[in-house]
Amino acid sequence: MKSTPTQYGSVAVTIHWLSAIFILAMLGSGFRAASMTESAAKEAVLMFHVPLGIVILILTLLRLFWWWRVDQKPRPVDGDPAWQTYTAKAIHVLFYVVILGMVASGIGMLALSGAGGVLFGASIEPLPDFSEFLPRVPHGLGARLMLALFALHAGAALYHHFVKRDGLIWRMWFGSKGKGAGS
């Protein structure tokens, strides 16, 4: 369950991959809702989007607690330049900041707009125009920043896997595989 100096444990791996899948679904549903004009269709998307945001918050808080109180992250890969190690840490910190900021701005929009009832399956007809509420700006910027961070993170993993061929990608999978898991 716990991580080793060279491999992430099953709890961290599970939280990582569930978070990745849910964040992609969240971004897709958010961009879809933002481009919709019909209130009923937008409401249906929001009834998926909002509870998923709560799940992502819970996963993020669980991950932070896991690292803070229970587990330790594997050490950085030997041989990587210092700037790559620093950049990786910065991107991970930014992920947490953006996720928490997105949750806060999402809650702000629901509270200010009166659309919080979608959390409980209540129909809000017509839905408010969320662009009229100040938290919409950081929410939209956060979504775009999340896409950029996601691309950087996935790009770095693919670089390590296909260019450096160091097996680093296997550190974030179940069990140990490749030379990156034991380096």
Image (cartoon, helix red, strand yellow):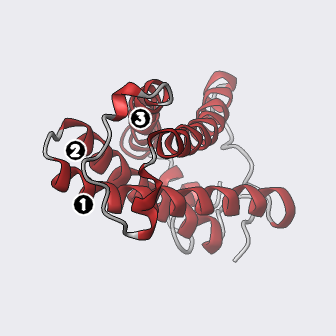
Is residue 139 among the parts visible in the rendering? Answer: yes
- C-alpha separation, residue under disc 3 versus residue under disc 1: 20 Å
Residue for badge 1: 44
* Label number found at residue 181: none
Q: Which quarter of the rendered picture does the C terminus lie within?
A: bottom right
State the residue in front, 70 or 51: 51
Depicted 47 relative to depicted 153: above or below: below
Amino acid of disc 2: Arg
* Label number found at residue 143: 3
Foreground mark, 3 or 1, reads 1
Q: Is residue 47 left or right of residue 167?
A: left
| The furthest residue to the right | 69
Q: Is residue 95 left or right of residue 3?
A: left
Is residue 170 among the parts visible in the rendering? Answer: no
Q: Which quarter of the figure has residue 67?
A: bottom right
**Crowd band around label 3 with a 10 angstrom C-alpha radius: few (<14), some (14–19), many (20+):** many
- Disc 1 element: helix
Residue for badge 2: 32
- Disc 3 element: helix
**Residue 181 horizontal/vertical position (percent):** 59, 60
**Residue 88 horizontal/vertical position (percent):** 61, 34
